[in-house]
Amino acid sequence: MKTMLNTLLIAMVVLTAASFETGLAGDAGECDQCGHPGSRKVCRLVCEKKTIQLPCYSSKCETFCVGGPCKMGCKHGDGLHGSGCCSDKECASCQTAKRFGYQETIPGCPKQFTRKVLLRKKIKKEVAVYRWVVEDLCKGCEEKAASAPVPTEASLPAPPRVDAVILRPRVASTVSLEPTPAKREDSGIVRRSVR
């Protein structure tokens, strides 16, 4: 049992060391920019422009009318017997004249009201988006390449977790790329001094 655990432990150490060697050495391929051999992986901060659509809300006033109570007007009526109703005299109920009647309605005085109507409009805005890019660069291109300049109020993404050289961005004031530890607050215990 002990021999099996020792063998397993040695195998894990060898595999871990082999993976670190390949991660650090890389494939020593060609440079992404100039094509020279002998490059290494470099993390570089890139600033890109992204167009986003933001909803914008406003309102406008709209006037409309509501009619008042209607007044009843004149009554009208027509006899329908001679105008094609049962002209062939097939049905006995149509022997008497049918009357069609209606009454005019006169609209009352309208009242004006104002209501606010919601307007929604989309505004296109261009914003800066920062992201880390892993590139294979040779020594000459690495000296020329630089990370994007970062304004002081910008929040940066965390650097990627790769075995590569990280080119630090140029910053107008001090901005730390490392995550800051959370501040501990008081535990809320009130201590009183005894006199």
Image (cartoon, rainbow, N blue to C red):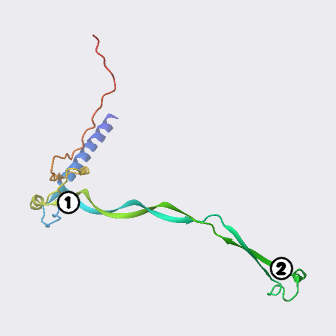
Q: CA distance from mark 1 to mark 2?
A: 94 Å
Q: Which mark is residue 98?
A: 2
Quarter containing the N terminus: top left
Of mark 1 and mark 2, the one earlier in the sequence is: 2
Asked if disc 1 and disc 2 are in contact, CB closer than 8 Å, the reply is: no
Q: Nearer the viewer, mark 1 or mark 2?
A: 2
- Give the quarter of the image for residue 70: bottom right
Disc 1 is placed on an element classified as: strand
Q: Position of residue 130 (x, y in %)?
A: 25, 56
Left or right position of 173 against 72: left
Q: Which amino acid type is shown beneath numbered disc 1?
A: Glu
**Residue at point 82%, 87% (across, down):** 82
Reading the image, the residue beneath label 1 is: 135
Q: Position of residue 142 (x, y in %)?
A: 12, 59
User: How many discs appear?
Assistant: 2
Front residue of 117/51: it is 117
Front residue of 176/41: it is 176
User: Is 35 located above or below residue 96 in the figure?
Assistant: above
Left or right position of 72 against 35: right
Left or right position of 189 against 170: right
Q: Which mark is residue 58?
A: none
The 10 Å Cα crowd at callout 2, few under 14, some 14 to 19, many 20 or more, is some
